[in-house]
Image (spheres, rainbow, N blue to C red):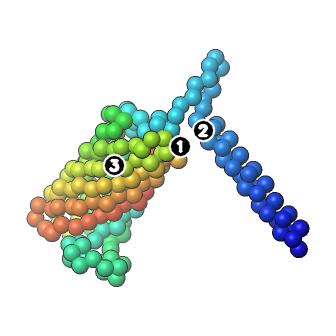
């Protein structure tokens, strides 16, 4: 019985070691490009670049002022409106760019419920692929009430490689004529 346990642990150790070697090889291959005349390597700091254009798709969840002021799990579950949207971003500098986005929470009436433009400041953390960001801007709401709004929020992006990442963020939205509300997004980003 002890021999079987030892063999099982050895197989797990060997399998884990092979998996680690495969992951390390894939990481090394992703972090090195080769041309015919020279080999050029880059660091993960190049995951976030200046002059970067990206497209994004995301799901949204929004909650109103009353739910925010009286926050509980039940109220969030019962009062959250779900939706989907898309956006485009352009980073002039590695840490600063602009973003335009639109989303819809239902298909009755107007198809686009909200559209906005934001200034975005991101701060990539070393070489790990993680970049917290903050944004502020404004836009127009077309569904329920036709109002202008200002907004600000925080988010976190993770890049798997130079071109593909995921993000999550949350914002407070302040319409000029109605009560404030909050919107959260979860989505993917493709960078060029």
In the image as oriented, which residue stretches furthest toward the front? 2
Q: Can residue 82 be seen here?
A: yes
At a point 62% along the width and 42% down the height, the residue shown is 27
Residue closest to the eye, 113 or 51? 51
Q: Can residue 163 be seen here?
A: no
Identify the residue under disc 2. Answer: 30
- How crowded is the residue under tag 3: few (<14 C-alpha within 10 Å), some, or many (20+)? some
- How crowded is the residue under tag 2: few (<14 C-alpha within 10 Å), some, or many (20+)? some
Which percent across, then down, holds residue 120? 29, 45
Where 178 falls versus 153 (above or below)?
Answer: below
Gap in Å between the C-alphas at discs 1 and 3? 18 Å
Gap in Å between the C-alphas at discs 3 and 2? 25 Å
Q: Give the foreground label among 1 and 3.
A: 3
- How crowded is the residue under tag 1: few (<14 C-alpha within 10 Å), some, or many (20+)? some
- Residue 133 shows which numbered tag? 3
Query: Cβ–Cβ below 8 Å for labels 2 and 1?
Result: yes
The image quadrant of residue 167 is bottom left
């Amino acid at each position: 019985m002890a021999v079987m346990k030892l063999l099982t642990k050895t197989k797990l150790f060997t399998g884990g070691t092979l998996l680690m070697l495969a992951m390390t090889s894939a990481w090394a291959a992703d972090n090195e490009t080769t041309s015919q005349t020279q080999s050029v390597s880059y660091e993960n700091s190049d995951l976030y670049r200046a002059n970067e254009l990206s497209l994004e798709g995301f799901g949204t969840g929004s909650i109103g002022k009353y739910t925010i002021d009286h926050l509980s799990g039940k109220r969030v579950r019962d009062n959250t409106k779900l939706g989907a949207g898309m956006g485009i971003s352009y980073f002039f500098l590695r840490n600063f760019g602009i973003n335009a986005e639109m989303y819809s929470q239902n298909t009755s009436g107007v198809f686009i419920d909200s559209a906005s433009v934001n200034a975005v400041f991101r701060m990539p953390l070393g070489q790990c692929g993680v970049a917290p960001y903050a944004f502020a801007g404004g836009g127009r709401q077309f569904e329920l009430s036709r109002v202008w709004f200002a907004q600000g929020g925080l988010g976190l992006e993770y890049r798997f490689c130079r071109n593909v990442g995921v993000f999550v963020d949350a914002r407070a939205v302040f319409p000029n004529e109605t009560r404030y509300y909050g919107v959260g997004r979860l989505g993917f980003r493709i960078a060029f």
